[in-house]
Image (tube, rainbow, N blue to C red):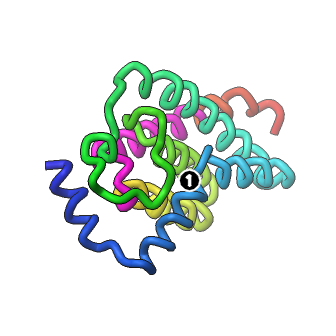
């Protein structure tokens, strides 16, 4: 069923969407856009705690998702299963579950949402676009995306709780 969903998405492909989704997915490469946002938030007292929560969420996501679950589960990517689909990006070398782009995007975006609703909604919209780009580009299964979303939100909630608990006396 997951391959059927991916093949249906592939029917949407055209030169304009190809460029858009390659660009959107590149924002999520190595979580860089979220790292930049988190560091930028550290510069302002009003957003400093949220910046710490974003960066802590990203660190946990990297350790648990990228270093832990991907290597433990070792799920092949759809582009490895069906190499006949033309890739628009470099073939990823790591495993598929969970989607790191999605995990980091939802960890950061939901961390922002918890403290700053308007900015959080914009962040979540970007997170959804990054997640969908991974399906469009045929490098993740839908359950990889779902797993990344759930883990990202969970880590944001955990990080929010822990950082607020640890920093209550500081702020």
Residue at the extreme top:
72
The stretch in magenta equals 136-159
Q: Which residue is mark 1?
A: 109
Q: Is residue 69 left or right of residue 108?
A: left
Q: Is residue 141 left or right of residue 171?
A: left
Q: Quadrant of residue 98?
A: top left
- Residue 59 vertical placement versus 146 (above, below): above
Residue plotted at (30% across, 57% down): 85
Residue plotted at (41% across, 45% down): 149
Quick check: is 29 in the magenta stretch? no
Q: Is residue 128 left or right of residue 25?
A: left
- Residue 35 vertical placement versus 151 (above, below): below
Q: Most prominent secondary structure in the magenta stretch?
A: helix
* Quadrant housing the C terminus: top right
Residue at the extreme front:
84
Residue plotted at (52% across, 38% down): 157
């Amino acid at each position: 069923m997951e391959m059927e969903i991916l093949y249906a998405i592939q029917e949407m492909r055209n030169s304009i969407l190809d460029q858009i989704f390659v660009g959107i997915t590149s924002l999520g490469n190595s979580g860089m856009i979220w790292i930049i946002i988190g560091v930028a938030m550290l510069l302002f007292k009003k957003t400093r705690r949220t910046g710490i929560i974003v960066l802590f969420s990203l660190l946990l996501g990297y350790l648990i998702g990228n270093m832990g679950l991907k290597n433990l589960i070792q799920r092949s990517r759809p582009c490895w299963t069906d190499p006949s689909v033309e890739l628009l990006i470099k073939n990823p070398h790591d495993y598929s579950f969970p989607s790191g782009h999605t995990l980091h995007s939802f960890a950061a975006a939901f961390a922002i949402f918890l403290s700053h609703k308007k900015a959080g909604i914009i962040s979540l919209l970007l997170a959804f676009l990054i997640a969908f780009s991974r399906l469009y580009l045929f490098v993740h299964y839908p359950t990889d995306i779902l797993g990344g979303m759930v883990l990202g939100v969970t880590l944001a909630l955990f990080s929010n709780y822990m950082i607020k608990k640890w920093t209550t006396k500081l702020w």
